[in-house]
Amino acid sequence: MITLTELKCLADAQSSYHILKPWWDVFWYYITLIMLLVAVLAGALQLTQSRVLCCLPCKVEFDNHCAVPWDILKVSVNMSSNPGTPLPLPLRIQNDLHRQQYSYIDAVCYEKQLHWFAKFFPYLVLLHTLIFAACSNFWLHYPSTSSRLEHFVAILHKCFDSPWTTRALSETVAEQSVRPRKLSKSKTLLSTSGCSADIDSSKQSLPYPQTGLESAGIESSTSSVLDKKEGEQAKAIFEKVKRFRLHVEQKDIIYRVYLKQIIVKVILFVLIITYVPYFLTYISLEIDCSVDVQAFTGYKRYQCVYSLAEIFKVLASFYVILVILYGLTSSYSLWWMLRSSLKQYSFEALREKSNYSDIPDVKNDFAFILHLADQYDPLYSKRFSIFLSEVSENKLKQINLNNEWTVEKLKSKLVKNAQDKVELHLFMLSGLPDNVFELTEMEVLILELIPEVKLPPAVSQLVNLRELHVCHSSLVVDHPALAFLEENLKILRLKFTEMGKIPRWVFHLKNLRELYLSGCVLPEQLSTMQLEGFQDLKNLRTLYLKSSLSRIPQVVTDLLPSLQKLSLDNEGSKLVMLNNLKKMVNLKSLELLSCDLERIPHSIFSLNNLHELDLKENNLKTVEEIISFQHLQNLSCLKLWHNNIAYIPAQIGALSNLEQLFLDHNNIENLPLQLFLCTKLHYLDLSYNHLTFIPEEIQYLSNLQYFAVTNNNIEMLPDGLFQCKKLQCLLLGKNSLMNLSPLVGELSNLTHLELIGNYLETLPSELEGCQSLKRSCLIVEDNLLSTLPLPVTERLQTCLDKC
C-alpha cells in the first residue's frame, strides 16, 4: 500500500521537472488534460445512458428502407404518370412489441448497424490522450535519460539556492555599476595629463593577470562573507558539476530521445487529423436498421435514433480543435529543435557582462538541457554557469582556505630552519591563504604541491622575506608583488612540474643572488628565451640546474659570466659538451653531479678562480688528470665521492692548497704516500672503500680535523694518526679493529668518536684525556662502556650535550 509520504515524494519529484519543461510542454500538458476530460465526459455519457439507441418497427417499407410520408407521396405521383407502379402497403401484422423485444432490437442494432467510430469515440480519445501523455513524459522516465535529468535538476536547485551564487552575481552587478565610473574617471585623467596614457598602456602590457574584482576596483571584503559550512557546500557543488559535465557532455542521448518523441507526436497528429474528421460524418442521429428477426417480432426493419449523436459531434469537433492546437505546437517544437544549434550552449553574453570571462561553452546533452532551462527561465542557466567558472571556483577555494588557515594556525607552523631563519612550509593546499601575509617575521616561504598560487600586492607586508621555494606548484605574481620581490628576494628555488616552464617574472628579480631550477629544462628551450632574461640577473652568484642536459646551456655561459657557483645535476644523463665552460672565468664553485663523465673534463683546468669542485656520481674509474689541478692555485675542496675510483695517483701531492678531500664511496685499496704532502688538509673522508691499512705518514697532516674511514677493512691504526693533535672528528666504525691505542688520549680536541662495528673488547682508560668528548658523541656498543674506569664513565654520563 502506498503511503501519503511516498505520494508526496512522488509529487515533489514530478514537480521538480518543471525547470526542464518549456512553454510548449506546459501547453501540451493542459491540452492533454482537456482531452482526458473529453474522453471521460463522453465515456460517462455513454455508460450512463440506459438506451443509447431507441428503435421503432417499420410498418411500411419502400425501396428497401422504411417508408416515410414523402415516399408515399412520391409513389402517388408515379402512379398517376405510370398506372403500373405498385403502391406500398403496410404490413398486415399489427401486434405490439413488448419492452424486452425493444431492448433486444436496440442491442442488436447497436452492435450491427451503429458505426464503430460512434461507439468507440470516447475510447479513441482516451487512447490518443494516453499516447500523447506517454510521449510527453517518456524522456523523463527513460532509463538512459532519467538519471541524468534527475541529477541535473538536483544540482540546478542547489546552484540556484547556494549563497555563493548570490555573492558571485552581486559582484557582477557591482562591477557593471563601477565600470562606467572608472571609464569616465580615466577619460578625465587622459584629458588632464599627457603621460597617463603611457602609464596605462605600460600596465596593460604586463603579462601578470589581474582578477576581475581588481580591474573593477572592487575589494572582496565588500562582498558577503561565507561561513565554513556554506563554503564547503559550494565546494561540493563545484565537484558535482565537474563530474556531471564529464559524464553528460560527451553524449547526446537526451537530445535524440526528446527529438524522437516530438517526431512521434507530429506523426500521431497527422494520423488523427486524417481520419477523425472523416469518420466524424458517420455519427448521425437516425439509423436505418434491418434485422432478420421477423419470426420473433413480426418486423424486419426498424428506425433507430442515436441519442448521443449530437453531443458526440460537438465533443469530436472540439477534440479535433485540440488535436490541431497540439499538432501545431508539436510542429513548432520540432522546428525549434531542427533550426537551433542545441548541441552547443554559449555563455558569451554572460562572459561579456561579468568578471567570469572563463565560463566555457558546453556541448551535447549538457547544452540541450541548458537550452530547455532557458525556455523556462534564463536565470537558471546564469546561476548554473557560476559553477562552471574556474575563476569562481578559485575565489571560493580562497575563502574556504582563509577560513581554515587562520593566523594562529599559520603561526604554529613557523619553525627555525638549519640556517636559523624563520621558515613557513605549506604543503598540498588548494592555494595560498591570505593570512600568510600577516606573518611579518617570516624569512623563508616554502610552497610545495600547491596547484595554483598567486602572490597579490599584500606580499609587500612580509618585510623580512628573503627566500622563496616553489616546489611543483604554479605561481602567478601580480605587478605590485613583483616590484616587492625584485627589491627583497635573494634566494629562489623552483621545481618544475612541466618541461621548460620557467616563469617570466623570474627574470625581473634583479637583486636575486641564488637561483635553483629543478626540472626537465632542455637546453634548446633555455636558449630560445629572451636574451635579456638571464642578462638582467646581474647580481646572481649561484645557479643550480637539475635536469637531463646534453651540454651546459649557452645562456648560462654567455649571459652569466660573473656567476661564482654553478651546480648541475644531470640525473644520470651523459653530459657531452663542456668546452663552453671555459668562459666562466669567475667561477669559484663547480658541481657536476650525475653527469656520467667517466673522466675529469679538461675544460675545468681553465677555471683559475675555482675553489671547490664536486664530481659526485660520475662513474669515474680513474683520475689521472688530477695532475692538472696544480694549475688551479685556489682549489681547496675536491669532491670525488660516489664514483668507481680504484686508486689515487701519486700526483695528488701537487695539490698543496687542498684543504678538503672527499674520496668516500669508491673502490680505493691503497693510499699513495704523496697524499700526505697535502699538509693543509683539515677534512679527509675515505669511508666506504677497500682500505686495509693507513700509512704512518698520516702524521704529516698536522691540520687534520675530520678523518673518516668508516666501512673499510682496517685492522690496525698507525701511531702517527694520534699525532694529528687538531683532530676533532674521528670515524672508525665498521672496520676490523681489535683494539684502540691508548694514544687516543692525546687527542684533547676530539669531540666525536665512532667505533661501532669493530672487534673491540675493551676501551682504553686513556679516553679520560679526551676532555671535549661527550657521551652522545661516542658511538660505540653499550657493553664496551662498562670496560672504562668509573670516573671516565661518570664524566661521560654527566655530559649529555649533543655533538
Image (cartoon, grey):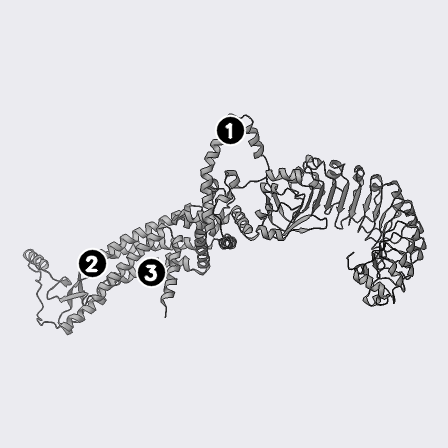
Q: Quadrant of the N terminus?
A: bottom left
The residue at which mark 3 appears reads as: 130
Q: Earlier in the sequence, mark 2 or mark 3?
A: 3
At label 2, the amino acid type is Ile
Give how far across and how far down residue 223 sits, in percent.
Answer: 48, 45
Q: How many numbered circles does the render carry?
A: 3
Q: Tell me residue 103's x, y (percent).
A: 17, 70
Looking at marks 3 and 1 on the same chain, the residue that comes earlier in the sequence is marked by 3
Q: Badges 2 and 3: C-beta atoms under 8 Å apart?
A: no
| CB within 8 Å, label 3 to label 1 | no
Q: Which residue is mark 1?
A: 189
Quarter holding residue 587: top right
Residue 311 badge:
2
Q: Confirm or deny contact between disc 1 and disc 2 (CB under 8 A).
A: no
Q: Secondary structure at mark 3?
A: helix
Marks 1 and 2 sit apart, C-alpha to C-alpha, by 81 Å
Mark 1: secondary structure: helix
Residue 294 is at least partly visible in this image: no
Q: Nearer the viewer, residue 747 or 454?
A: 747
Q: Amino acid at mark 1?
A: Leu
Compared across the picture, whether 609 is left or right of 371 comes to right
